[in-house]
Image (cartoon, rainbow, N blue to C red):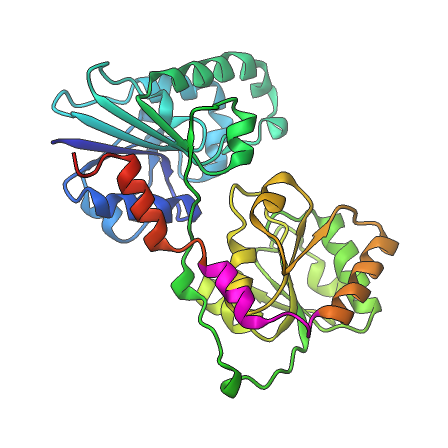
Amino acid sequence: MKVALCIDSLLFRDDSTFLFELILNLFPNSEIYTIAHKRGGILGQVETRPIVSSFLSHKVGKPDVLKKNFWILPSAVKGIPFHPSIEKVIVISQGYIHGLNFPKHVQSYLYLVDWDLIDQKSLGWQKLFNPYVNEWREKALTHFKKIAVSSETLKEKMHLPNAEVIRPTFRTEEYPFVKDEDHNFMFDHHLLYTHGLSLQEFKSIASALLAQGEMVRVMGPFEQWPNIKKDFPQIDFVGDHCEATAALYSHKAKAIWDFSQHYFPAKAFGSFCTGRPAVVRDNKINREYLSSGAYFLNSFEKQHLIELCHEIEGSFLSHDRRVLRRQGLRWNERLFKSRMAKFLDKNE
């Protein structure tokens, strides 16, 4: 059976790319369809498959360029040439590629990972096309034989009562656990990710931690804040690194602060895997996935942050590292592949 696997973009590697690669492993002879592909942008097995993309591939080299072409995304997706030999189409969508045109007789499966790949609130004049684009992508949801979603929160948001919930996964193998006999139990810093933080939010957190005499390490992109190192010379800015490097810092942290606004709290679960608690935004996704081991922040006001710092200081030693790790490993790759294979009727 000829299979097509579809994803919104192949411009750079992110969490959805990892899910896509796991599904690729289930269908070794499949072709790939995407809105935009940058050759060499994603090393690995993706580049070994035939890749069909839209006309936007000639214009789009970075994810932000998709925003600029928001108004023509329906035309780009519908114009992707679908090979007539395809008998089964599997779409891993963050809100757009599922609008692909394919014949009605083709077996069709949609895994809706997210709906907000593009933050429509941040668009400029392209906002004029929001009603048109959103009507097109909502209508496209009706074209699929089976639909699964990444969370109960997304299922409720999209009004898909019959959708199956298949929890995502992340690179659990990149977060090793330091055994008790090898750990010095010196939790000497707070690890703060910049992903999803505004400059003002970052300054509020950093100032609160430093005021309490805490050592702060910062991981993630910060080039968009040109004077930040001068403003906070006491902070160790370690750069934007992979999960394995993050684990080197997180296993000795009092807590890991992650404010990514994402469909799955992968960085928080990564901190759990190394045996450390996480501070996250107080939102539906984090409340759905995270339980013990998480501190939920709903205000960046100075007093609230100071109170949270005191709470962490009084409890960071009380967390059972192995219990936290079990929580992180709960959403492992093997479970995801098993559930996805069943959903996709892999054994038909």
Q: Residue furthest right?
A: 303
Q: Residue at x 58, y 26 (%)?
A: 120
Q: Give the percent coordinates (x, y) of residue 15.
A: 43, 48
**Left or right, 67 with reference to 145:** right
- Count of marks placed on residues: 0
**Front one among 161 and 169:** 161
Please tell me whether residue 313 is drawn above or below residue 161 in the rendered image.
Answer: below
Where does the image place residue 265, in percent across and percent down from the top left? 54, 50
| Residue 132 falls within the magenta-colored stretch | no
Q: Is residue 298 left or right of residue 196?
A: right
Q: Quadrant of residue 202?
A: bottom right
Q: Position of residue 293 (x, y in %)?
A: 63, 61
Tell which of 281 and 322 is nearer to you. Answer: 322
- Residue drawn at x 62%, y 30% as measured from the top left: 122
Q: Is residue 18 above or below residue 210?
A: above
Q: Is residue 46 left or right of residue 189?
A: left
- Quadrant position of the C terminus in the picture: top left
Q: Is most of the magenta stretch helix, strand or loop?
A: helix
Q: Quadrant of residue 30?
A: top left
- What's the residue at 33%, 21% (across, down)? 144
Res 53 seen here = yes
The residue at the point 52 percent across, 32 percent down is 154
Q: x and y percent of residue 223 in the render?
A: 60, 54
**Which portion, as a residue range, is magenta?**
316-329
Quadrant of the image containing the N terminus: top left
